[in-house]
Amino acid sequence: MPCACRWIWVAGVGSQAKPAKSVNGQVCQICGDTVGVSATGDVFVACNECAFPVCRPCYEYERKEGNQCCPQCKTRYKRQKGSPRVHGDEEEEDVDDIDNEFNYEQGNGKGPGWQLHGQGDDADLSSSARHEPHHRIPRLTSGQQMSGEIPDASPDRHSIRSPTSSYVDPSVPVPVRIVDPSKDLNSYGLNSVDWKERVESWRVKQDKNMMQVTNKYPEARGGDIEGTGSNGEDMQMVDDARLPLSRIVPIPANQLNLYRIVIILRLIILCFFFQYRVTHPVRDAYGLWLVSVICEVWFALSWLLDQFPKWHPINRETYLDRLALRYDREGEPSQLAPIDVFVSTVDPLKEPPLITANTVLSILAVDYPVDKVSCYVSDDGSAMLTFEALSETAEFARKWVPFCKKHNIEPRAPEFYFAQKIDYLKDKIQPSFVKERRAMKREYEEFKVRINALVAKAQKVPEEGWTMADGTAWPGNNTRDHPGMIQVFLGHSGGLDTDGNELPRLVYVSREKRPGFQHHKKAGAMNALIRVSAVLTNGAYLLNVDCDHYFNSSKALREAMCFMMDPALGRKTCYVQFPQRFDGIDLHDRYANRNIVFFDINMKGLDGIQGPVYVGTGCCFNRQALYGYDPVLTEADLEPNIVVKSCCGRRKKKNKSYMDSQSRIMKRTESSAPIFNMEDIEEGIEGYEDERSVLMSQRKLEKRFGQSPIFIASTFMTQGGIPPSTNPASLLKEAIHVISCGYEDKTEWGKEIGWIYGSVTEDILTGFKMHARGWQSIYCMPPRPCFKGSAPINLSDRLNQVLRWALGSVEILLSRHCPIWYGYNGRLKLLERLAYINTIVYPITSIPLIAYCVLPAICLLTNKFIIPEISNYAGMFFILLFASIFATGILELRWSGVGIEDWWRNEQFWVIGGTSAHLFAVFQGLLKVLAGIDTNFTVTSKASDEDGDFAELYVFKWTSLLIPPTTVLVINLVGMVAGISYAINSGYQSWGPLFGKLFFSIWVILHLYPFLKGLMGRQNRTPTIVIVWSILLASIFSLLWVKIDPFISPTQRAVALGQCGVNC
């Protein structure tokens, strides 16, 4: 019976092989053999995504003869060192394995061998070759894969011992490789400098690995490494800790390829359609035809901008257990990175303090080491109500946080936890849970009463202003003129919870405001929080949420760290964006508040390019990216863009012109770096040679970051934490200094650093600047939504929210940061640029959209149409166009998992918003940019629903935004009445053309149906103001119809005009 053990070579022992049992104990799930080890001496891992155990022979066979995918996760196998290239492999930059990459052994159909643990010789672990003598002459390795101890060659034959299998039969002579004595050994890869360096590096690596194993596992000392018992489990944990913290889950190829084919077909059909439309004008309605063609061309361009960024959608999956194994082992100090969480609020009357309190409580109870989390609440309205509510929240957190962690409840916002209509006893095993839950619910009800009492008190402002408990005036009585305020409620010096454990730090911040200074609204508040947090805690990463977006999952921070702390992704990831999910929306989502199409389709598409856009909340940032630094990029990352790469093909060898272009890119990168790149930060200021250079650099830093030595020193702490030389007593004073209203003067804050100024939608600008520098972002969609918030379900509030977003896009369109012309010397990928262009030009679509929605009514009133008589040949193009549109939508729903109702609601609100808020945004943006007339920023109300389910949905609030869609509705209704009346008067021959016009008009009304329901209210009674507008508009168009007089025949009209001759 053959020995079921493995042969390893131990550096420094010579050529004696010692049997040792498997280090990992894994067995191939295909053939049942031992998995083996890789060329580097580590356990062989065929799939880098899920680590499904597969041995090397099965891996090679699957790549060459099979479907080239992992049996478990279906991810395509990547080429491992020592393996030959197969069709479909990605381009590689390394050349140290080029011989094996392009070489297949013809004899046995296998690729080049793989290395035994610690040796580097080729071995065959397949069951069929385990007992066979090896009489074939092995191939040369040319020194590329040779490493380890080389046995002495015979002096007369100058032979080199060949690679052996895992099982050595002593009765079979070891085959040798014949070496020509007259030939230079360097040609075999031996005695060359490269070969010697590889041998030496291999020895060092093996010594280091053995030291790590023997130090961590004393039982495994010696030449043999035991792979059984607890040691095998420990080694398995070590192997798991080395695996990636996340993986890309590709969309099934059969869905994605068909989707792309339909997109190409739709583009081709569009070309033929426009060729027909342009070459077949309507002679008797030339104006209508021209307007319709212009609108259709714009719609096609808008579709292209929206469609192609969705060309390569992906999904992602995280591994929280691997993150814990690598950075947060039980019984050891946590190595997780510190995180500062920002919560922004302005007006406590529109953003109820109870909602803000729930958000803060969910942050304090998050599943993360308490000494690694700090919560900063920005009160940009300097309201005493917010301050007092936060003080009450800090006291309640001492009871709430230990309750959450003890019973592991979700979500950890009490208002939403106690409102859940679920079996809260499910999976609970502690007998005391029911009693403690009831007690905690009573505590929370008392907490709500105290908060509501503060809100009621704040409704009546005293004439002399608010005063604090000690009798002094509240510094923020004047919201536009007050000093900066900072209060630390919880943390190292803020007391403990009821179980005696430390709580995360909770800090209240209200930046200084003075007349005559630009404060830049939310962007300015966020930049103040960046500086305050850098001085007090300096977390390596930042996460910002709106005050109404609570942590729905206590694992949210860990989900983000799976990307940020991944060695491969973290160094070039600027932020991790989470989707927005909402509570309190009506069942049918009448006004598309959930934005499912955007978050589940568009964002997944962007994740496959350079990353999703920043949407303003639920986003975890790399602090260094916010400081304006460039990422650490490899040569592959610096390639121009994915389109050029796919069009030009993949090439192994790069010509001189390509290398010159890459060197130019590197030079541009170095010159475009603000002051330092990431390597400079890591080196700190130790590289300066004299005091003069230090002084000059200090001046540059002050010009860039502002005059705060403590803050500047914190920017060098890339892993977070306060600089060791900092005096703790001076931190609070310095924190007050960095939020002063004049601190940002003559600095790059808001221009290159932090949140970027220049638009009310600062989130788009901030993300765009990061992507232009070469950073990539990540879209994280775990099964349980990490964040949930509230959305305005009332029609008027919803339109005002959309107006603000569209206004911000118009401001960017008319600024120097417009993606159409900004950043072409950077590293923004082409499809990512198209996505940003679509993000800022979509409000302009409102102009052709309104024109196109009015066209059917005009056609019905004038008895003309925008399309001439259609032949069978032309009708085919119309049918194919509509079929391609529906096919594209259906296939999108298929790969994304979005429901058809969500898709239809999105289409409806695209028309509602386009005919109202987007149109107003275009004109307001032009007035603001060209005439300097600023529009007031209004905070979206986040009041809770206290009058019943969805009571706010039926409340009618008049706004001028309702006028354009109301007008479009009335015009189309009048046009339908006029068209039907004309057809009745003209006979059956006029009904055919009428159906096309009616279908056009009905299609518009169907898109505006949710708007019409919003006007009707709960009791289906239309408000008086709407009735007045409807009667006025209907009268205008009725008079127009009477003027056209469709009931009078052409002969009667001629008689009336005196134009009739003898043939009347």
Image (cartoon, rainbow, N blue to C red):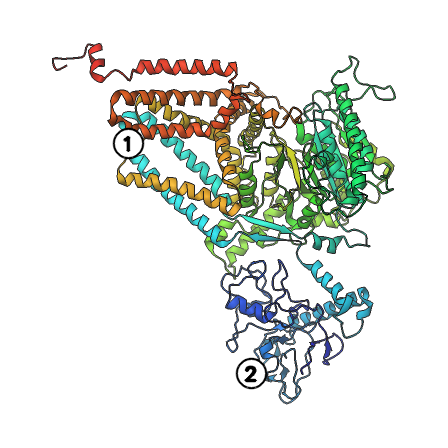
Q: Is residue 447 left or right of residue 601?
A: right
The residue to which callout 2 is attached is: 136
Residue 169's x, y, as percent?
65, 85
* Residue found 32% across the figure and 14% down from its top: 1042
Residue 820 seen in the figure: no
Is 796 or 982 nearer to us in this picture? Answer: 982
Q: Is residue 432 left or right of residue 16?
A: right
Looking at the picture, which amino acid does disc 2 mark? Answer: Arg
Is 163 or 322 nearer to us in this picture? Answer: 322
Residue 418's x, y, as percent?
72, 35
Say if 1056 sits above or below 91 in the image.
above
- Separation of marks 2 and 1 at Cα, in angstroms: 79 Å
Labels 2 and 1: the sequence-earlier one: 2
Residue 772's x, y, as percent?
58, 42
Quarter containing the N terminus: bottom right
Looking at the picture, which amino acid does disc 1 mark? Answer: Pro
* Residue found 54% across the figure and 54% down from its top: 660
Quarter containing the C terminus: top left
Identify the element where label 1 is drawn.
Answer: loop
Is 119 or 903 nearer to us in this picture? Answer: 903
* Residue found 28% across the figure and 35% down from its top: 870
Q: Would you identify the image quadrant in which residue 779 lies? A: top right
Residue 670's x, y, as percent?
63, 47
Most extreme residue toward the left is 1062
Viewer-nearest of labels 2 and 1? Answer: 1
Other-residue count near label 1 (Cα within 10 Å), few / some / many at <14 / 14–19 / ≥20: some
Identify the element where label 2 is drawn.
Answer: loop
Residue 293 seen in the figure: yes
Mark identifier at residue 868: 1
Mark identifier at residue 173: none
Q: Would you identify the image quadrant in which residue 223 lies? A: bottom right
